[in-house]
Amino acid sequence: MSKKNNTPLGIFMEAIGLYFSNFTKFVRYMTFPVLGQIAGLLLVFLITYLYTKNLPPLIDKFSALNNFNILILLSVLITLPGLAIFVKAFWDYLVAYGAVNSMYENMQKSGRVYDFGAHTELIKRRTIPFIGLWFLFGIFSALSLCPLFWIICGILAIYFVLVFQVFTFEPELSPIGCVKRSLMLVKGHFASTFMLMALAGALTYIFIPQLFIKVFDLTGINDFLARGIIPVISQLPMPDLTQYGVKSPTEYDVAIFTIKVFAAQILIQYTLPMRSILWSMWYKELNGGRGKYAGGYAENEIKSAGKKSKGKKRPSEKLMEESHKKYGKKKLDKNIIRRAAEKDDEI
């Protein structure tokens, strides 16, 4: 492997390279978490649309349906399958936040990513503290919706950007401990962290989604998909904006907007591994693992800790071994044989 560039820009470029060098594997890993959410929501909307459209004749045919409580109960029951798919996919997506961080350990050594199940299990074994961390994240996100807290939350978002990396690599810490640890790591590296956040945000939240949306526009894909959902859009109440001196959107306009939002969201979620790799690299950097920009622990403390813990395994390494054991000896042996074969092919 080439010599590592420890500057923020160098880390950004290296993260992009690691993501695209394992692109097909990451796409397969993220497909259900991403498309499962979309499929679940579409199933809910489709069933609700068919239910609403056929409700009057059903009431005429079955008088028992002419009851508000029964109608509400049926509405909930028919949407449960779609909601179940959405919740499962959404949970898997949240777990990927931590699992990809663990995968970076493999990529750091070999440039490859493998044993997705073991990395995922590494996070699921700590479900309760992981939910606690997301609960804290939810509170922070709710506060950030208030305009009065925008500046404060924007600054804190930079200090707290490494919480999921800390959760993965320092499993002995509580959710609150992860927040404090992230703050301490970023302290003194605010400008560099902000630079990385701006680069990652511009690439994965703006450039890549807009590039694909433009291609879809030119090829007519957006128009084709929009016309397919217009029957559903037509069942929704359309806002009248003429009283504000603004032209009211047509059903087609709303459909096009919906398609573009969904397309952008899908692309943003598919690039989650790239962001996780980036922040895992930055965590390692600030934790003293990559050289010039090392922070957090003083160099002598790192050496001292290394001497004391020589021969001992880190908590994250112990958890990884336990995750492997859950999959049984046969599956693990197959992975070992496969990886060995891949190395032989390269030679």
Image (spheres, rainbow, N blue to C red):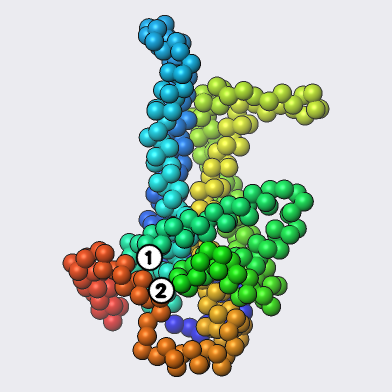
Along the viewing direction, whichever of 121 and 226 lies nearer the viewer: 121
Along the viewing direction, whichever of 208 and 73 lies nearer the viewer: 73
Q: Which residue is mark 1?
A: 122
Q: Secondary structure at mark 1?
A: helix
The quarter of the picture where the N terminus appears is bottom left
Tag 2–tag 1 contact (CB < 8 Å): yes
Q: Position of residue 176 (x, y in %)?
A: 56, 65
Query: Which callout, 2 or 1, points at the residue further toward the start of the chain?
Result: 1
Q: Which residue is mark 2?
A: 316
Residue 40 located left or right of residue 230: left
Q: Is residue 48 visible?
A: yes
Q: Is residue 7 above or below residue 62?
A: below
Q: Secondary structure at mark 2?
A: helix
Q: Is residue 91 above or below residue 230?
A: below
Residue type, mark 1 in image: Leu
Q: CA distance from mark 2 to mark 1?
A: 8 Å
